[in-house]
Image (spheres, helix red, strand yellow):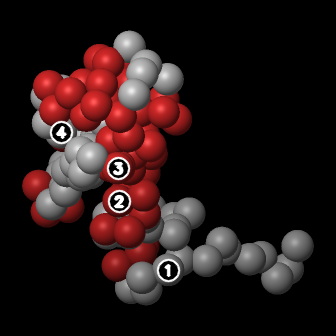
Amino acid sequence: MNRLDWQNLIATAPPGLSLAALARHLNQEYLQTRYWAKLFGYSWTDGRSLPHPGKYDHRRKLNPALADWSRTNLELAKQFNISRQRIWELRRKHQPCPNIPLTNSKPSDSESSPIALPESNPGT
């Protein structure tokens, strides 16, 4: 193929294809297509910047105030359509610490002090 053939091929190609798609469309080799496309000023898209189809929308933001943190990571991930790993990260960052009483005694005994220590028997 000569220069004029390549110019005609490039001119008839639809605009905005990636180089790989352009090479497939023209039924030519990738490196030759890249050379001639650059020479004739074909504006291609960078295939690396195209969003890849996936199960989750990784650009989606989650407002932590909307999350019911009593639910499991899997349930939250399904609700907000993000990965369980992302829920785990957000849970560690935004979930308030649970109010776990550190007591071994009855609830009525713990009113006097916030933390009840185990009883010690000095005589035994």
Q: Based on the displayed image, in which of its 4 quarters is residue 22 positioned?
A: top left
Look at the image and tell me whether residue 87 can be seen: no
Residue 97, image x, y percentages: 38, 69
- Return the disc, 4 or 2, that comes first in the chain's sequence: 4
> Quick check: 104 left or right of 2?
right
- Distance between mark 2 and mark 1 Cα atoms: 29 Å
- Say which residue label 2 marks: 90
Q: Residues within 10 Å of mark 2 (few under 14, many from 20)?
A: some
- Say which residue label 4 marks: 16
- Looking at the image, which is closer to me, 33 or 84? 33
Q: Residues within 10 Å of mark 3 (few under 14, many from 20)?
A: few
Residue 115, image x, y percentages: 50, 80
- Say which residue label 1 marks: 115
Q: Nearer the viewer, mark 3 or mark 4?
A: 3
Q: Furthest residue to the top?
A: 27
Q: Amino acid at mark 1?
A: Ile
- Distance between mark 1 and mark 3 Cα atoms: 77 Å
- Say which residue label 3 marks: 39
Q: Residues within 10 Å of mark 4 (few under 14, many from 20)?
A: few
Quadrant that contains the C terminus: bottom right
Q: Residue at x 48, y 33 (%)?
A: 32
- Return the disc, 2 or 1, that comes first in the chain's sequence: 2
Q: Nearer the viewer, mark 2 or mark 1?
A: 2
